[in-house]
Image (tube, rainbow, N blue to C red):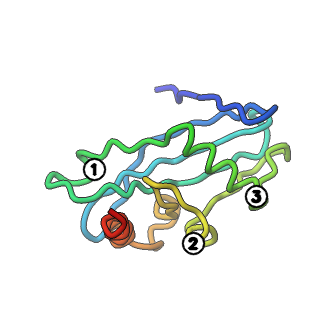
Amino acid sequence: MRTRLRQLRIDARTFVWSAKIRHVSGSGDCHRCIRLRVWGAGKTSRALQADLLSVTWGSPWGACVTDTAFPTPADVRAVIDYALLHGWQPEEPGGTFMLSEDEHATGFELPEFLLTDRLRTPESGDPTTRVIRADEARQAVR
């Protein structure tokens, strides 16, 4: 199956991005995770990658079965803006700039997602614990 590439124009630059649905296991459930990749200067430029953990919680059938979270263009714009402020240089040739949970999770926020390293590093933070904490924080605001 081909990956669908989408475009997002910010000022004078066109960014191309893709998002692949994945799943990660946690201590209490399976969770939806979206691998977001963005290019800002062609296919041989330095890519941006962020693994976004859905904060959907509380379904009786399990998050993997019912979660429909997917990043919107506004979410992708927020990821791009954050990455540009934190050192991503899309015009550089080759390589990947990672927005990792370890380095960026405390300063990065999206309403429906958290950064996770679980797709790359199975020993990283437990997604179930992180999703429950995010859900409790959202419930406290309501």
Relative placement, left or right, of 12 versus 103 is: right
Q: Which residue is mark 1?
A: 64
- Amino acid type at mark 2: Thr
Earlier residue among tags 2 and 3: 3
Determine contact: label 1, label 3, CB under 8 Å.
no
- Amino acid type at mark 1: Cys
Closer to viewer: mark 2 or mark 1? 2
Question: Alpha-carbon neighbours of circle 1 within 10 Å: few (<14), some, or many (≥20)?
Answer: some
Instruction: Give the label on residue 15, or none.
Output: none
Q: Position of residue 112 (x, y in %)?
A: 43, 53
35 is higher (above) or lower (below) than 18: below
Q: Which residue is mark 2?
A: 106
- Amino acid type at mark 3: Leu
User: Under tag 3, what secondary structure?
Assistant: helix
Earlier residue among tags 1 and 3: 1
Residue at (30, 65) in percent of width and height: 139
Q: Give how far apart the Cα atoms at labels 2 and 1 are.
A: 25 Å
Residue at (79, 45) in percent of width and height: 90
Earlier residue among tags 2 and 1: 1
Q: Which residue is mark 3?
A: 85
Q: Residue furthest front?
A: 142
Q: Position of residue 15 (x, y in %)?
A: 71, 35
Closer to viewer: mark 1 or mark 3? 3
Question: Alpha-carbon neighbours of circle 3 within 10 Å: few (<14), some, or many (≥20)?
Answer: few
Relative placement, left or right, of 8 versus 33 is: right
Q: Quadrant of residue 76?
A: top right
Q: Nearer the viewer, residue 137 or 92?
A: 137
